[in-house]
Amino acid sequence: MSAVAGIRVDNPQVDSTIASTEPALDPESREWLSSLRASGREHDQAVARLHELLLRAARFECARRRPTLPHLRGNDLDDIAQQAADDALVSVLAKLDTFRGASRFTTWAYKFGLLEAAVKLRRRAWQGREIPLEPETWSLFAGAEIEPDKSVEQSELLETLQQAIADVLTPHQRRVLVALALNGVPIDVLAERLSTTRGALYKTLHDARRKLRGHLDELGLSLETTEAN
Amino acid sequence: MERPDLKQALGRLLGPAEPEIGCDECFEQLDRYVELELAGADADAAVPGLRAHLAGCPACREEHESLRALVSGEQAL
């Protein structure tokens, strides 16, 4: 990761230093940074415009997910969008100096609004639901359709996988894999329940997957049918 | 009810075979990646490992789809 500090448009010397290693800012992005770093009325107006932009992103996300959340009413969704925009505003302002102009400022800011809304909606959808973490509560690929001409190989692969999940993984890796990859628990929801971060959980999932792939490889089992979709 | 496809189920379980970046790096690069995609540039070459991460992480995949849809919709206006 680059350790270069954020571009400061109010300091030409820093601008010219960074110009050789960072993309040039487009005029609109430059204006956003300049006004957000200003003081007084200009700053306040820029913050209000930024909140509007983030609210647009949050509402966009709520609208996209609405069909999967039939129990939420329009007012609930708008409350979630408002909260998401408020939280995203805090994040964007705190991270302003990390914006390096690799995209337009609005695209960079949008992702914060979308993320906050998506996380809130996923958590709301799982509110009050129990999260199955233990191997006893699942049956590996129950009912999965096995191709007739590969039934022996695929049955062997499934049995080996089930055994490997029980024997090769640590208890924590097993719980995370079962919840995320088998039971479809959203990663933000599991992170909240386990008091950890999304990044840390994905690292655990990645390590567990690598262990399983390595184990199957050692046994000479074909991974031809295991490409991610 | 349609029976789950074994290949898809195995894909969800074992994730991508190729090297991938993590969720934090994905979030950091997502805006650049989406703009490159929408510009018709080779986003996968510019941000190695992000495409594989999207294949293995449903949450990041959803956020990528949303950002791409939002930005492309604004560009179309």
Image (cartoon, coloured by chain):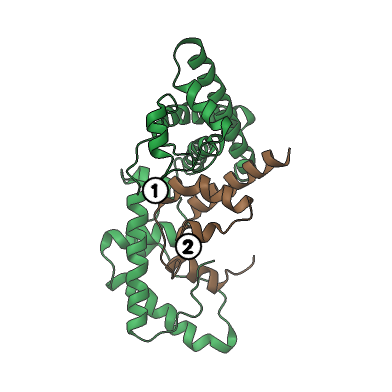
Chain colours: A green, B brown
Residue where numbered disc 1 is placed: B24
* Viewport quadrant of the C terminus of chain A: bottom right
Q: Can residue A149 be seen in this view?
A: yes
How much space separates mark 1 and mark 2, taking CA atoms? 14 Å
* Closest to the observer, A14 or A202: A14
Whole-percent x and y of residue A160?
A: 37, 80
Q: Which amino acid does label 2 sit on?
A: Ala
In the picture, residue A144 is in which quadrant?
A: bottom right
Please report contact status of discs 1 and 2: CB closer than 8 Å, yes or no.
no
Q: Mark 1 lies on which chain?
A: B
Residue placed at 62% from the left, 42% from the top? B71
Whole-percent x and y of residue A60?
A: 62, 37
Q: Which chain carries label 2?
A: B
From this view, report whether residue A197 is shown above or below residue A145: above
- Residue sitting at the far top: A40
Q: Residue B52 carries which label?
A: 2
From this view, report whether residue B30 is shown above or below residue A135: above
Q: Do labels 1 and 2 share a chain?
A: yes
Whole-percent x and y of residue A52?
A: 58, 25
Q: Is residue A71 visible?
A: no
Q: Is residue A92 left or right of residue A50?
A: left
Whole-percent x and y of residue A200?
A: 32, 51
How would you rate the neighbour count of disc 2 (Cα within 10 Å): few for under 14, some for 14-19, many for 20 or more? Answer: many
